[in-house]
Image: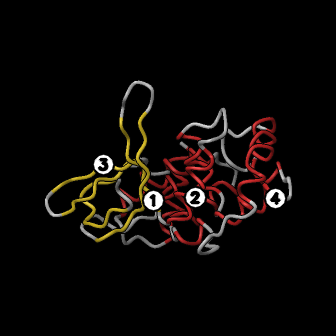
């Protein structure tokens, strides 16, 4: 089993990254908010991984910024109705301790901040995971939006201005391609707004 991958980023998209490790390129699926916060192409990155094989025997390697994020992803997948895409959204939207607190306190509204997570499913998650997650220990309380700055902050700002999370993520990706990886946050916002308004 692959616990983590450390290597050079050779390619990245909204939901996928290729990491070169000693001449071997690993394709990892990552949440969009994680992808936008990754280092530039050519830089070194460490991603903690989860190996997933679906019913059609398709194998996917998922990448996350921390071991805690992998724990949350794996735990979310144990809930009926939660697949890899939604589990990724949970990891991207809530920190491990935010997720844990929401379940322990029965705060369905906090869970519903996750895109495509309905009220009914939030209640199912709380009921299913409350016992297991209560005793789990997490290494840190890093807010995803802070750990993936500055692009995650840009996405958050665009959402606050009325864009959907998907629109914001796609606009920021386009703006990043135009302005480059070293673009300032203010310039990213201005450029991204052009794509949303169009």
Residue 20 point in image, percent of width and height: 22, 60
| N-terminal-most mark, 4 or 1 | 1
Identify the residue under disc 2: 155
Q: Are marks 4 and 1 in contact (CB under 8 Å)?
A: no
Q: Earlier in the sequence, mark 2 or mark 1?
A: 1
Which residue is denoted by mark 4 in the rendering? 104
Q: Do the residues under discs 2 and 1 have CB atoms within 8 angstroms?
A: yes
User: Of the residues tagged 3 and 4, which is closer to the observer?
Assistant: 4
Q: CA distance from mark 2 to mark 1?
A: 9 Å
Closer mark to the observer between disc 3 and disc 1: 3
Distance (Cα) linking label 4 and label 1? 30 Å
What's the CA distance linking mark 3 and mark 4?
Answer: 35 Å
Left or right side of 2 for 68: right
Viewer-nearest of discs 4 and 1: 4
Q: Nearer the viewer, residue 177 or 7?
A: 7
* Neighbourhood count class around disc 1 (C-alpha, 10 Å): few under 14, some 14–19, many 20 upward: many
């Amino acid at each position: 089993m692959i616990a983590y991958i450390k290597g050079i980023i050779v390619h990245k998209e909204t939901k996928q990254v290729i990491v070169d490790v000693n001449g071997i390129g690993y394709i990892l699926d990552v949440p969009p908010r994680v992808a936008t916060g990754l280092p530039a192409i050519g830089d070194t990155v460490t991603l903690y991984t989860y190996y997933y094989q679906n019913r059609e025997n398709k194998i996917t390697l998922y990448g996350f910024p921390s071991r805690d994020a992998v724990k949350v992803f794996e735990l979310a997948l144990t809930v009926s109705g939660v697949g890899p895409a939604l589990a990724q959204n949970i990891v991207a939207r809530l920190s491990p301790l935010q997720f844990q607190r929401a379940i322990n306190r029965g705060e369905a509204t906090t869970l519903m901040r996750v895109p495509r997570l309905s009220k009914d499913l939030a209640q199912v998650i709380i009921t299913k995971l409350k016992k297991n997650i209560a005793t789990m220990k997490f290494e840190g309380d890093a807010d995803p939006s802070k750990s993936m700055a500055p692009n995650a902050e840009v996405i958050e700002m665009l959402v606050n201005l009325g864009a959907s999370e998907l629109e914001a993520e796609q606009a920021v990706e386009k703006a990043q391609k135009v302005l480059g990886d070293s673009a300032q946050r203010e310039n990213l916002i201005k450029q991204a707004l052009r794509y949303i308004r169009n």
